[in-house]
Image (cartoon, rainbow, N blue to C red):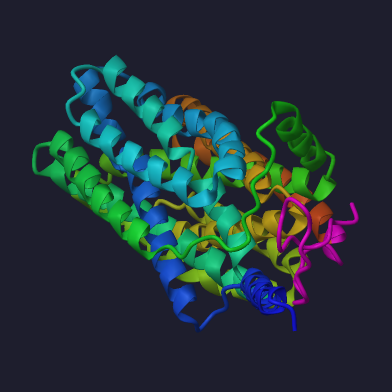
Amino acid sequence: MSPSEPDLAVVAQAAAAALDDVERFIQRGTGDFVRANVALFAAGFTTFALIYCVQPIMPVLGHDFGVNAATASLSLSATTQCLAVAMLVASSLSEVYGRKPVMVLSLFASSALMIGSAFAPDWTSLLVIRALAGIAFSGLPATAMAYVGEEMDRSSIGLAMGLYIGGTGLGALAGRLIVGGFTDLGSWRLGLFVIGALALLSSVVFVLALPPSRHFRRGSPRPRALAAGFARLLRNPTQVLLYLEGMLLLGVFVSLYNYLGYRFMAPPYGFSQTAVGLIFTIALVGIASSAWVGDLAGRLGRGRIFPALVVLFAAGTALTLSSNVVVILLGMALLTFAFYGAHTVASAWVGIAAGGGRAQAASLYLFSYYTGSSLVGWTGGLAFVHGGWNGVVALSGVVLAVALGLSGLLALRGAGEDGSVPGPRPTAAGSAASPPPPSG
């Protein structure tokens, strides 16, 4: 035996161990699954608490700064639109520099900006800070979705995505309740400061808990290569349909919640700011449903489940036309259940159908998603100003009718493309553990 043979054996063993590590995906029931979901839950909680904390205080911001309902809604729309555009860049950076570094920077920067917004001296300053925060938020949502798609075992993706989206829902709820409660006590500024401080703590949890990426493969930093990745995705009909669904469904969801507070604070209801904030606890229905619906869709087929969720969304919206508070809240609960379920299904579907460049696929979906929030949310303000709550519901009905038609097209394309049947996950150059490219 030559002196070099033992060295070759060691190298071979190391290579085999490295290959085994690459092929290991995070499965439900393991310690890594728990740690990853704790981290992603904390990240989703942080980001969405900061995005949506202004939603219940729009009437107060309008009063304090002397602006109408449509203008006050810019405190959310400016954030989501900047988030939508910046996410296209942030997702590409995560393809080059890695998932965790981009997410960590996003979380700490957005927390600091939220604390700064508590000291905004005027309406313009507040909008500028909220817009900058939207840019800071952009490093988290699409990158988190890409991490789930890369690192989770195929059979666990639906559950993991549901748990992450549950964290986003709980964060949005907590942000609304905390800021709404402090506003009722006399200071929306203190509420923004407190939610920013809590976001910093959640960011630390994320850093400590998230397992390292095993399947990330650094992409090309060349703009031409990144642009080619976007172009490939936009030629995929399933991806485009999912992007449009995200735009339409979130637009309606945000519009309904934006102006529900105005409705309930006005006669004949006369709710307090705290009572309006408590209405957002309805989001718990969606938080509870997201993981369950995601898991169900993974077993029964996303193409079968998604249209049914759009129908439930429309039914819940129609119930809010009632003047009875209980019926209104039941309608909001039903549409919230349907929205969170649909978003969970679409989020997982985007990653599975992407083939490669998952962060870019997720960023295109979320670009459309938050563009819908901004555009339909603002348009809903005009509908409310001119037609009251009935105007908001009428606008929502038209948008949901389009969404239902698109969901039928998705159902037709779903067979063989939705990834509902578990199977092996081959690796591919530039995108380890990617599923086979979709046929369409």
Asked whether 6 or 390 is in front, the reply is 6
Q: Residue at x 86, y 66 (%)?
A: 415
Query: Is residue 414 within the magenta segment?
Result: yes
Q: Position of residue 147 (x, y in %)?
A: 56, 57
Q: Position of residue 52 (x, y in %)?
A: 37, 43
Figure check: 315 above or below 154: above
Is 411 placed left or right of 274 in the picture? right
Taking the view exactly as shown, the residue that stands out farthest to the right is 439
Is 87 placed left or right of 309 in the picture? left
Asked whether 129 or 17 is in front, the reply is 17
Q: Position of residue 77 (x, y in %)?
A: 45, 30
Query: Is residue 25 within the magenta segment?
Result: no
Q: Quadrant of residue 39?
A: bottom left
Q: Residue at x 68, y 56 (%)?
A: 351
Q: Quadrant of the N terminus?
A: bottom right
Q: Residue at x 39, y 54 (%)?
A: 43
Figure check: 129 above or below 359: above
Is 251 placed left or right of 354 in the picture? left
Residue 435 visible in the current orientation:
yes
Asked whether 175 or 22 is in front, the reply is 22
Q: Which residues are magenta?
A: 412-440
Is 243 placed left or right of 173 in the picture? right
Q: Residue at x 37, y 32 (%)?
A: 133
Residue 272 visible in the current orientation:
no
Q: Main secondary structure of the magenta part?
A: loop
